[in-house]
Image: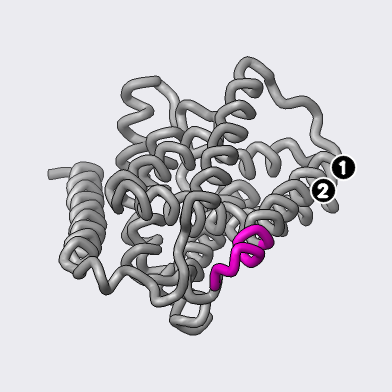
Amino acid sequence: MSSDSLFTAVGAVANAFFLLTGVYIYVSLARQISARTADASIPSSRTFGPPEAMLASVLVGLFLANLASARGHSPGVLSTRDILANALISIALFLFVAGFLRFRGLDLNSLGGLSKIGFWRALGTGMILLFAAYPLIFLADAVTRRILGSGAVRQEIVELFNSSQTVRQRVLVILLAVAVAPLVEEFIFRFFLYGVVKRYFGRLAGLTVNALLFAAVHAHLPSFAPLLVLGGCFTIAYEWSGSILVTMAMHALFNSLTLIVLAFPSIVQQ
């Protein structure tokens, strides 16, 4: 056997091992979640009700309308104002939903498990669970490549980074990717939308709807399957850990690694 064949075989075995490890970890988490009693998953404080369901429906409608309007429109030259507007809209949405929930008397700390675990534990747990999710994401991307003849997980934040023209723009994109997007998207998708759908239709429906919507709003067909898997892993991690901080950490790390690969393409095999 030649050295090239040996390396290929070793690589295939390693890839299979990491894939099976990722599947095992997330299946184990899902089984642990399903084994919990109903009472154990219900917080002692007030939970989402009809007003939250109405707000969630409005948000989903807005996301889908924005997705429909974005079809067929190619992005133009990106300006610093565009990046700032994107960040401000995201933050405004976060503040509006959080303010609405507080006005309704809901305890965000209890519902989101903000004080359930510390920062470093959330970061460490997020790193491990993201590492376990990557083989599943790569598999989804490989299947997409085989079917569509293209692939690569190109999120909106990736498009922003690739379109940025100046150092200032790239710094803003990095802040948007590492700080704003994980905070806002995890709060909206995992904490709020998943929480509302789960409240009325159960965990499985919540996970399915959440992952589908999360993948769809990024409006890029080749990345739909990988982002669907990523969204599902985020949701399982949130449900298992009981803290939205874990998925925020996972999301921030995922975006950080994506931007590192874009900034230093020589560190990965092209």
Q: CA distance from mark 1 to mark 2?
A: 5 Å
Residue 18, image quadrant: bottom left
Looking at the rendered image, the quarter that the N terminus falls into is top left
Q: Check residue 46 for magenta coloring.
A: no
Task: State which region is magenta.
Answer: 99-107
Q: Looking at the picture, tell me which residue is in the foreground, 92 or 58.
A: 58
Residue extending farthest to the top is 72
Residue drawn 20% across the image and 69% down it: 36
Residue 69 sits in quarter: top right
Q: Is residue 199 above or below residue 41?
A: above
Q: Is residue 39 visible?
A: yes
Q: Are marks 1 and 2 in contact (CB under 8 Å)?
A: yes
- Tell me residue 260's x, y (percent): 59, 55
Left or right side of 217 for 83 = right
Callout 1 secondary element: helix
Label disc, if present, on residue 17 of the rendered structure: none
Would residue 100 be counted in the magenta stretch? yes
As drawn, the label of residue 84 is 2
Q: Can you say whether 209 is above or below 190 in the image?
A: above
The residue at 63%/44% (across/down) is 157
Badge 2 local density, few (<14 within 10 Å), some, or many (20+)? some
Q: Position of residue 135 (x, y in %)?
A: 31, 51
- Residue 250 lies, in percent from the top left, at 47, 62
Residue at the spot of label 1: 81
The secondary element bearing badge 2 is classed as: helix
Front residue of 162/237: it is 237
- Residue at 22 percent of width and 54 percent of height: 23
